[in-house]
Image (cartoon, grey):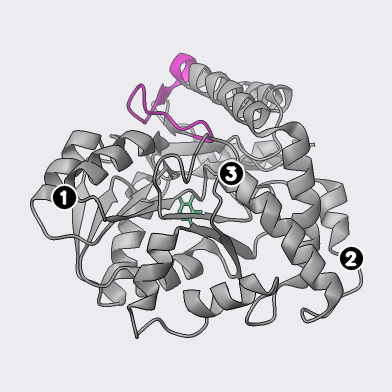
């Protein structure tokens, strides 16, 4: 039964949770090499890339920080339209990576023409953008933005935060020319928290090669060398790899297209409910398929609502950052089924009738 309607962490299937109780294996064993190789092959299908997908024992932010250090060392343009775009600017700032923000009002998307204009105004080596901005519920048009960016700087490194979208919203890493696509285990992939994933293109890896100051834990060259040998350069989260192995099978058995269609259906349910009872926060035409941010037009007490929902073990989320008291958020990603979302919304209606 779906319980967590917060935009991550999400519910994990029983059989996936159970995988974590398997006996630990060494990461320099034949058993692990096989596990890693087979996981890698399926991760590439999931990310729609023929290159590589690194896996780290960290949350998504850790691996993102590592990638920024490895790959973005002259000047980044960071698209900001919410809390996670803002976080990426802070990560650049705290790593002394020169950057500018291409900001839009929270609740608005970043648009291709605006990004292209901002890019032509400076000498940038990389562009960072959030796919599904989990604070505002905006889904940015990544394919169009990437195409517009390449039109300005053919060689620019395009880095996408797909933390709350990968596995729920179509994202074609190679086809769209994306160099870095990052996600975390605990959102759309419906795994326990603790792993981060990044698809990195050859261009991305070449960038890292020309950089002497990559750090150690998230050194892409070390990660690449180990990946070629079907292992990781430091001790991996072995139990989470077992869970990942099982969940990748489940995701591919459902089918990526089917999974995307289910998320579209979930979003339609959440958005039309929000239109009817409150108002969606995100601009029309750019609403995320995995999280709906709702303007709290009726000023319901979200703390009291969650207390009420806890009787059926459900929970939703407050607004994020400065939207905390003006919005609330419903996550509809991962394993959630449409009838489960209907049930949640009916419970909210009971509370807020
Ligand atoms: C949750 C989230 C993050 C942060 O991921 P962690 O795994 O908690 O580090 C970053 N970006 C987006 C869009 C998110 O939803």
183 relative position to 27: left or right: left
Above or below — where is 175 with respect to 346? below
Dot 2: element: loop
Residue 207 or 353: which is nearer the viewer?
207
Q: Name the residue under label 1.
A: 119
Q: How far apart are marks 1 and 2 (CA)?
A: 49 Å
Q: Kindly identify the residue that appears in the image at 58 percent across and 70 percent down.
A: 58
Asked if the residue under mark 3 is in contact with the one under mark 1, i.e. CB atoms within 8 Å, the reply is no
Give the numbered dot on residue 6: 3
* Circle nearer the N terminus (1, 3): 3
Residue 32 location in percent, x, y?
80, 71
Q: Name the residue under label 2.
A: 21
Around disc 2, counting alpha carbons within 10 Å, would you say few (fewer than 14), some (14 to 19), or many (20 or more)?
few
Q: Kindly identify the residue that appears in the image at 55 percent across and 73 percent down.
A: 224
Q: Is residue 272 magenta?
A: no
Q: Does the magenta stretch include residue 287?
A: yes
Q: Nearer the viewer, mark 1 or mark 3?
A: 1
């Amino acid at each position: 039964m779906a319980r967590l309607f917060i935009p991550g962490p999400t519910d994990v299937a029983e059989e996936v949770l159970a995988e974590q109780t398997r006996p630990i294996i060494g990461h320099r064993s034949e058993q692990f090499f096989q596990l890693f190789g087979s996981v890698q092959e399926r991760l590439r299908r999931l990310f729609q890339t023929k290159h590589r997908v690194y896996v780290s024992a960290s949350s998504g932010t850790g691996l993102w920080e590592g990638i920024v250090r490895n790959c973005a060392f002259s000047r980044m343009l960071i698209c900001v339209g919410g809390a996670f775009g803002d976080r990426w600017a802070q990560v650049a700032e705290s790593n002394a990576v020169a950057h500018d923000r291409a900001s839009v009002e929270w609740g608005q998307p970043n648009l291709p023409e605006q990004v292209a204009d901002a890019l032509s105004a400076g000498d940038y080596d990389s562009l960072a953008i959030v796919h599904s901005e989990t604070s505002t519920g905006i889904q940015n048009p990544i394919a169009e933005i990437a195409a517009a960016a390449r039109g300005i700087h053919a060689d620019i490194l395009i880095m996408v935060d797909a933390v709350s979208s990968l596995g729920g919203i179509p994202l074609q890493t190679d086809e769209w020319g994306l160099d870095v696509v990052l996600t975390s285990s605990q959102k759309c992939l419906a795994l326990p928290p603790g792993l981060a994933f990044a698809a990195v293109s050859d261009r991305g890896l070449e960038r890292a090669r020309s950089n002497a100051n990559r750090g150690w834990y998230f050194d892409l060259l070390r990660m690449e060398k180990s990946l070629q040998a079907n292992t990781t350069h430091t001790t991996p989260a072995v139990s989470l790899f077992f869970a990942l192995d099982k969940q990748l099978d489940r995701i591919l058995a459902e089918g990526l297209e089917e999974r995307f269609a289910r998320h579209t259906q979930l979003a339609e349910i959440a958005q039309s409910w929000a239109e009817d009872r409150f108002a969606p926060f995100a601009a029309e035409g750019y609403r995320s398929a995995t999280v709906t941010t709702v303007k709290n037009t009726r000023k319901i007490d979200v703390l009291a609502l969650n207390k009420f929902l806890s009787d059926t073990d459900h929970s939703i989320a407050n607004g994020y950052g400065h939207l905390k008291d003006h919005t609330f958020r419903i996550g509809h990603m991962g394993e959630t089924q449409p009838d489960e979302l209907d049930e949640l919304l009916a419970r909210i209606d009971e509370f807020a009738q």
